[in-house]
């Protein structure tokens, strides 16, 4: 394991984890094999014309920490579903679209655009992006960064960026644990857990309005409140091949409040004209706002 060297504390944690269960060493070996497969897949399927939209195509794995995360996920899958302990670990990745629900052994997962996850049995590891998980009657274990979540008949949205993990509970009870941080935290509907880097996690309780706004993408919608027109168009461009372009700093700094269909940028442009008196020109691949 070449890059992304572990510090002394993490080396001790790795040694302890490997010693705790003989199956962990096998999980680590399988994780390294998965890593190599993913690297080959990325090289073979790289787009001929790179997108201008930031996303997983520009993300890089960060060495040993990610391998250990994959290994831990594989170990969780083995413990929860012994009958599939030697089954396939699947790599899920989306581009500029929201995925259809992907079945887990207990429940399902729906990935937001520009997201990546590893799933095996009843376990899932969020690598990058955002996922809507609906748990079934059986136990389900999720992970992202240092956060581990166990649930049964619950649902949540799990998000992961380079240094931030978020878990938003939509229904049921979810038990959250952090690597090396003792007892689990029970999270109920509306709870939002945030952990940046290896800092102590913070838990907030969202209002019904905030919860509806945070989950709008699962219904194919987006709600803007304080976002500028420039920020709004950037979000639309993540989900659509037909891009929005705002001309002029003054127009880009203005705000348009409302709820819009994620996959209808033309409707957003029409509303910008009606409310902000912005002109727009439609062509097959783009919409320009002036």
Image (tube, grey):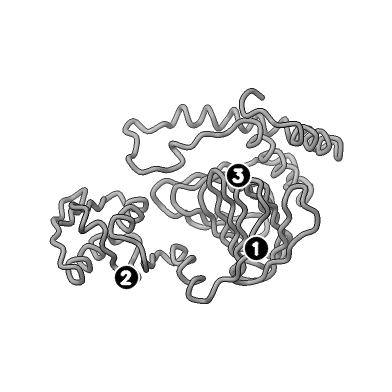
Q: Residue furthest top?
A: 2
Q: Secondary structure at mark 2?
A: loop
User: Whole-Å distance between the Cαs marked 2 and 1?
Assistant: 34 Å
User: Whole-Å distance between the Cαs marked 2 and 3?
Assistant: 36 Å
User: Whole-Å distance between the Cαs marked 1 and 3?
Assistant: 16 Å
Residue tagged 1: 135
Residue tagged 2: 257
Q: Residue at horizontal 72%, vertical 42%?
A: 72
Quadrant, the C terminus: bottom left
* Sequence-wise first label, 2 or 1: 1
Name the image quarter holding residue 141: bottom right
Residue 149 % position (x, y): 69, 56
Q: Residue at horizontal 60%, vertical 57%?
A: 194
Residue tagged 3: 118
* Sequence-wise first label, 2 or 3: 3
Q: Residue furthest bottom?
A: 208
Q: Measured along the vertical axis of the image, is residue 15 above or below residue 1?
A: below
Q: Is residue 258 left or right of residue 214?
A: left
* Sequence-wise first label, 1 or 3: 3
């Amino acid at each position: 394991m070449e890059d992304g060297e572990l510090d002394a504390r993490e080396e001790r944690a790795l040694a302890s984890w490997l010693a705790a269960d003989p199956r962990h060493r096998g999980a680590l070996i399988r994780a390294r094999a998965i890593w190599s497969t993913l690297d080959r897949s990325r090289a073979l399927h790289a787009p001929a014309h790179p997108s201008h939209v930031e996303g997983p195509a520009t993300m890089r794995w960060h060495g040993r920490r990610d391998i250990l995360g994959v290994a831990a996920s594989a170990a969780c899958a083995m413990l929860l579903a012994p009958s599939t302990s030697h089954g396939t670990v699947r790599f899920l990745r989306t581009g500029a679209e929201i995925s259809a629900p992907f079945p887990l052994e207990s429940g399902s997962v729906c990935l937001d655009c520009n997201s990546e996850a590893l799933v095996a049995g009843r376990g899932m590891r969020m690598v990058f992006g955002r996922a809507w998980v609906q748990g079934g009657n059986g136990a389900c274990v999720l992970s992202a960064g240092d956060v581990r979540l166990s649930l049964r008949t619950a649902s949540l949205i799990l998000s992961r960026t380079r240094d931030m993990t978020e878990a938003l509970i939509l229904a049921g009870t979810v038990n959250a644990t952090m690597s090396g941080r003792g007892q689990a935290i029970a999270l109920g509907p509306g709870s939002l857990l945030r952990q940046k880097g290896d800092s102590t996690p913070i838990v907030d309780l969202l209002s019904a309005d905030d919860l509806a706004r945070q989950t709008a993408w699962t219904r194919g919608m987006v709600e803007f409140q304080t976002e500028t027109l420039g920020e709004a168009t950037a979000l639309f461009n993540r989900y659509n091949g037909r891009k929005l372009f705002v001309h002029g700093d003054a127009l880009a700094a203005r705000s348009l409040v409302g709820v819009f269909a994620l996959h209808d940028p033309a409707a957003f442009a029409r509303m910008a004209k009606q409310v902000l008196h912005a002109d727009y020109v439609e062509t097959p691949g783009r919409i320009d706002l002036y």
